[in-house]
Image (cartoon, helix red, strand yellow):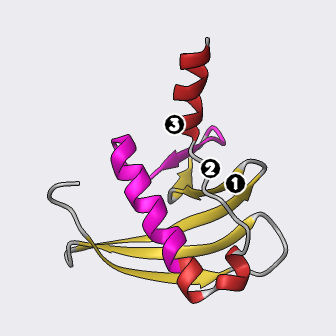
Amino acid sequence: MEHVRITRIQVFPQTDGRNTLGYAHVTLSDAFVVKNLRLVKGRKGVFLGMPSFRLRNGEYADVFFPVSREARSLLTEAVVNAFRQEHPDLMEGMEIYDADAEAAAALQTA
């Protein structure tokens, strides 16, 4: 990404035995902080959940989200690497699940 840099990542492990591995706060270009990015263990690997709020109809809406595949990959890899560095036991054997890459591969084989 050209103009936005990740300048700080704080990670907070969640060890309740559920699918949430932890949360992260990310500082962008020393100007903005995005709190409560959620690292989730899914069936196909780990992925990053965006901070969201519940709508009146019961659905959730993301408060912050990447607008490009490149931005999502950059953010996910940075947060996963921070978790791996600070909590290697929590991330042992975990691979990043990339839904965009899986969808692209499915289209190529179709």
**What number is the disc on residue 90?**
none
> How many circles with numbers are drawn on the protein?
3
The quadrant where residue 29 appears:
bottom left
Question: Which residue is at the front of the view, 110 or 8?
Answer: 110
Q: CA distance from mark 2 to mark 1?
A: 5 Å
Q: Amino acid at mark 2?
A: Tyr
User: What range of the chain is rendered magenta?
Assistant: 57-82
For the point 56% across and 88% down, the residue is: 86
For the point 50% across and 73% down, the residue is: 81
Residue 75 in magenta stretch: yes
The 10 Å Cα crowd at callout 2, few under 14, some 14 to 19, many 20 or more, is some
**What number is the disc on residue 100?**
3
For the point 47% across and 63% down, the residue is: 77
Q: Is residue 50 left or right of residue 67?
A: right
Where is residue 94 drawn, in percent x and y?
A: 70, 65
Going from the N terminus, do you reach mark 2 or mark 1 first?
Answer: 1
The quadrant where residue 93 appears:
bottom right
Where is residue 40 drawn, in percent x and y?
A: 67, 61
Q: Secondary structure at mark 3?
A: helix
Residue corresponding to mark 2:
97
Q: CA distance from mark 3 to mark 2?
A: 9 Å
Q: Is residue 64 visible?
A: no
Residue corresponding to mark 1:
45
Residue 86 against residue 44 in the figure, above or below: below
Name the image quarter holding the C terminus. top right
